Image (tube, rainbow, N blue to C red):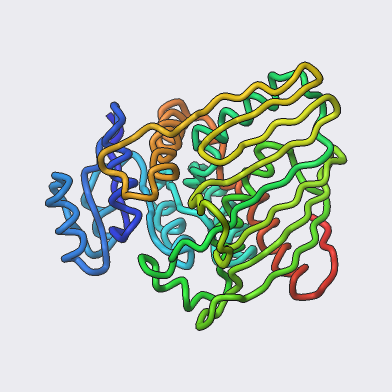
Amino acid sequence: MLRFGIVGTGFWAQFQLAAWQELQGVECVALCNRTRSKAEAMAHRFGIAAVYSDAEEMLAREQLDFLDVIADATANPHFVQLAARHQLPIICQKPMAPDLESAGQMVQICQDAEIPLMIHENWRWQRPIQEFKRALVESPVGRPFRGHFLYANNFPVFENQPYLREVEHFILADMGSHILDVARYLFGEATQLTCQTRRVTPGIKGEDVATVMLAMKNDAIVTCSLSYASQLEGNRFPETFIRAECEHGSVELCPDYWVKVTTQEGTFARRYPPQRYTWAAPGFELVQAAIVPCNAHLRYAIQNGEPAETSGEDNLKTIRLVFGAYESARTGHSVQV
């Protein structure tokens, strides 16, 4: 049985913990939050015995097999250093760091301490995206030459996460880290990118609209369109629509979880809805269901001493795309990655 502690008991932590409790062979034994009352409330709800307001104290007192940090990206470098001192594998949320330099330092610290750094990048674990990947690999559509991602809606994201109004880097850091990671997952690595951003919603500091064009190593061109300011027919938050145009056909992830494969023989379509969990928040079922297979993969990596699919080293490539996109938007020039 793997024993672990959680640092951070905010909005997303409750769903992360609920997803862990869906799995066997792993047990949360301690919660930590700077505001102790918040940790106590969550501990009472989930039956966790130990509560702390100081992470150092938690690691000193508890016998843990790994640490799950569910906090703001600015806090991740500190907790990575703490985990390294205690020789403890660590999971961090996305984006893995507030800037590219800190991300690189986090990876280096864990490499030097010989401990795993894993990023809880769950977007690629959504069932429709997993099935899109399978169709892209197994269907006779051939090599992709163009891809397109559309994540566009007007979901009131600032209502349950009001702090996002104040962040300087918004949609590229918050959602771009997901979408650009999936772009890598489906189409491989990029060599060059170009980005433009816009701020549409009044009263926010960061960008809420971004368009990124990626030139991939396999010669495909992939565009990623992100927006929290788009009022479209049939608002499908939080679905991501994806299209791969290939040599002998195409693969599409369409609204309502339909995956469609088109070749000269015609179009084959099948719907892949997410699994339903009673603890998922209304409207978030798609992304919160993906936490379970993501956690299961991270548990397997820890148990077997194998690199996670979304290791710190791997996610550093995604972070380079995120901050490369900010550089391109700022300078008006393409960026080599």
Indicate the quadrant where residue 212 lies.
Answer: bottom right
Q: Quadrant of the C terminus?
A: bottom right
| Residue sitting nearer the eye, 328 or 111 | 328
Q: Is residue 117 visible?
A: no
The answer to whether 206 appears left or right of 334 in the picture is left
| Residue sitting nearer the eye, 269 or 228 | 269
The answer to whether 13 appears left or right of 314 in the picture is left
Instruction: Name the residue located 49 percent from the left edge and 43 percent from the top edge.
Output: 122
Q: Is residue 238 visible?
A: yes
| Residue sitting nearer the eye, 60 or 28 | 28
Instruction: Name the residue located 52 percent from the left edge and 35 percent from the top edge.
Output: 257
Residue 47: % across, % down: 13, 44
| Residue sitting nearer the eye, 187 or 96 | 187
Q: Quadrant of the N terminus?
A: top left
- Total numbered circles: 0
Q: Residue furthest bottom?
A: 203
The answer to whether 29 appears left or right of 303 in the picture is left
Residue 126: % across, % down: 50, 37
Q: Residue furthest front?
A: 233
Instruction: Name the residue located 65 percent from the left edge and 24 percent from the top edge.
Output: 135
Indicate the quadrant where residue 34 lies.
Answer: bottom left
Residue 322: % across, % down: 66, 59
Residue 296: % across, % down: 41, 31
Q: Is residue 309 above or below residue 91?
A: above
Q: Is residue 45 above or below residue 154?
A: above
